[in-house]
Amino acid sequence: MLLAVLLAMHWAYALLGLVCCIVLGVLTLLGDCMLRSQTRAAAVASALATASASNAMRAAEPVLAMGMLPALARRWAAEERDAAAGGGRALLRARAVLAVTRGLRLAMTGAMVALGLVLVLGGSATAGSMIAGNMIMARLLMPFEAFASTYRQWIEASASWRRVRTALAATAPVRATEPLPCTHGRLVVERLVHVLPGSDRPVLRGVSFSVEPGEILGIIGPSGAGKSTLLRLLAGMAEPTGGGAYLDGHSTFLWERSDFARHVGYVPQSVALADATVAENIAGLEKPDLAEVLRIARRVGLHEAVQAMPHGYATRVAGFALSAGQRQRLALARALYRRPKLLLLDEPSAFLDDAGEAMLVGLLRGCRAGGTSAVVVTHRPKIIAPADNLLLLSEGLVDRLGPRESVLRAVHGPAVRLVRAPPQAQAAS
């Protein structure tokens, strides 16, 4: 529009305005090439420094206890310096582009004045057109300078939009939106394969087994064998790369989460509790049924500890220091609250004492008697005592699967009993 106005006054005004726009446009493209990679690298370095600080805050106690704070502070300071240095270089380049753009804009408005003066002296234009042309040229070139002054923000916004567009374009599996029936609680795992993002080596390779209602399956194996990953897949927390896990014929991953939680109780290795009351945590942040909360708390041996709290079951977890064993009992209570058909327990006795282990063994036997099946990952021999079958996982493969005693004999060999020799044999020797 402004170029059309200049053309109406004189073709030379329009030609000069067009040339100036092209020059500033080319300069903008060059600035994009100079700044984009530098700004992106600075943003990544800043994100890494922030992530390091967040991880340190989550592990504050071991960092302080092991004297790692000075080294951690040095690492964080180095990452912050890298981020600041990259940001500083990007800022200097952005200011250089802005300075060049501003200088060219002033020179171009001066050129418009000079052109108008030549046209006025030659009788081709009036003095008013010279003044109007100068004002229009300043308005025409102003967006280029404004863009150069906010160039870094434009680049960061563009990068953010690309990330959002990539996330929206990714084909995410559609979970079920309607409740699914779970009348028996039979779990079937068929040729389950899982590869972590960014890795080319599968964590699980063709794992297959089934768990009947009321059956307890213990999963054992060395560290890094894929036991916790297997349990996360059974809980639908990650998408299988191949195969699947099915509860009463329905994929555990595609199951709608709130409906799935009515049928499956899950206790991960790292217990996370909400900033809510004890009763609300047991009830899964729903309105607690106090009779059911009391029943479950007594069942996991937590009732006496809760009674000793300042406000009993109304005590907020975030404001009261729970021991690791109490947190694990609370997680067990939360998993049992809805009377699930299937229990998934990942090292449920990691922080329990002997009394807690005895409680857990009795709990598993009670679940079996009530028709609730369970899959338990553990390294504790006591915890696998109630198991009907054992699955030995090794490097993501099913090494052995069968009745508990037969798998234990195959793994450890037959037990050797030491029998004292009779007195007659001792005398002969």
Image (cartoon, helix red, strand yellow):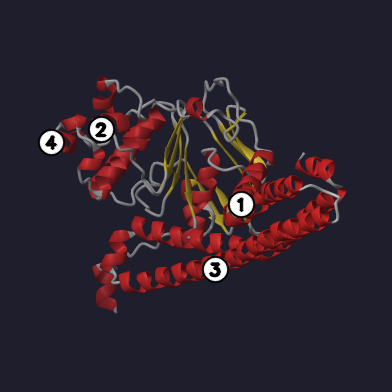
The amino acid sitting under disc 3 is: Gly
| Mark 2: secondary structure | loop
Do labels 3 and 4 touch, CB within 8 Å? no
| Mark 4: secondary structure | loop
- The residue closer to the viewer here, 120 or 90, is 120
Q: Is residue 24 visible?
A: no
Q: Which mark is residue 146?
A: 1
Q: Which mark is residue 346?
A: none
Task: Report the Cα–Cα distance between label 4 and label 2.
Answer: 12 Å
Label 1 Cα crowd, 10 Å radius (few <14 / some 14-19 / many 20+)? few
Mark closer to the observer (2, 3): 3
Mark closer to the observer (2, 1): 1
Task: Quadrant for residue 8, please give it.
Answer: top right
**Disc with the residue nearer the chain's start (3 vs 4):** 3
Task: Report the Cα–Cα distance between label 4 and label 1.
Answer: 60 Å
**Disc with the residue nearer the chain's start (2 vs 1):** 1
Task: Residue at 36%, 62% (x, y): give it.
Answer: 417
The amino acid sitting under disc 4 is: Pro
